[in-house]
């Protein structure tokens, strides 16, 4: 297995988890916290997609899909490139209102397609390239990709757990 095939397999699994978490849910289920004060499924999937969009756009030195498409309108918020969900207050969380499960899936799949384009052409030497020198040690492309996958997998699992809680009500 080649390096890029390994990374593609890893990121393709995130897509499977996103679908499992939201397919067939209505807006109420997407925006209802499983317990008071916990993040709803729609926010979790939106957030993991925003992080991937933000970070992959940075790796490609291109604008985020969030800011160049009509995605923000489908979630009831402005197309602010800095709004990825980090540091969200409860009012920020509840402001994210996906119009449907399809909005979440379509945004995720658009971001995933862009990620796959990057991964299709990545080489082992690319992974050592420093992409963020604001940290000590500086962050390489390889570390950034693992960080994206790790964050996305965690949030997809949280969304799947939340769905299980809501399905049992």
Image (spheres, rainbow, N blue to C red):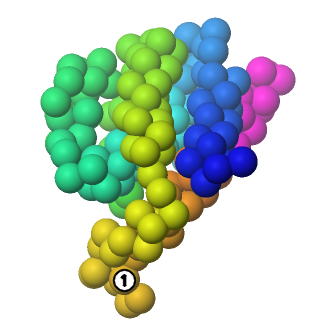
Residue 67 place in picture, x, y as percent: 18, 35
Residue 165 place in picture, x, y as percent: 77, 32
Residue nearest the viewer, comparing 35 with 112: 112
Disc 1 on helix, strand or loop? loop
Q: Quadrant of residue 41?
A: top right
- Which residue appears at 27% of the width and 50% of the height? 60
In this figure, which residue is indicated by the disc labeled 1?
138
Residue nearest the viewer, comparing 77 with 23: 23
- Which residue appears at 19% of the width and 45% of the height? 62
Whether residue 119 is visible here, answered yes or no, is yes
Q: Quadrant of residue 79?
A: top left
Magenta residue check for 166: yes
Residue nearest the viewer, comparing 90 with 2: 2
Q: Which residues are magenta?
A: 155-169
Magenta residue check for 23: no
User: What is the total number of numbered labels drawn onto the structure image?
Assistant: 1
- Does residue 116 appear to the left or right of 23 in the view shown? left
């Amino acid at each position: 297995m080649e390096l890029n095939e390994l990374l593609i397999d890893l990121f393709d699994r995130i897509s499977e988890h996103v679908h499992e978490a939201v397919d067939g849910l209505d807006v109420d289920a997407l925006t209802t916290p499983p317990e008071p004060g916990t993040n709803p499924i729609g926010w979790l999937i939106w957030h993991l997609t925003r992080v991937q969009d933000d970070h992959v756009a940075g790796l490609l030195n291109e604008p985020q899909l969030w800011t160049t498409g009509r995605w923000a309108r489908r979630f009831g918020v402005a197309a602010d490139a800095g709004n990825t969900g980090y540091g969200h207050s409860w009012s920020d969380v509840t402001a994210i209102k996906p119009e449907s499960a399809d909005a979440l899936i379509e945004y995720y799949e658009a971001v995933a397609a862009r990620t796959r384009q990057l991964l299709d052409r990545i080489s082992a030497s690319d992974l050592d390239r420093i992409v963020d020198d604001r940290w000590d040690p500086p962050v390489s492309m390889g570390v950034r990709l693992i960080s994206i996958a790790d964050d996305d997998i965690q949030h997809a699992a949280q969304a799947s757990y939340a769905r299980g809680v809501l399905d049992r009500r």
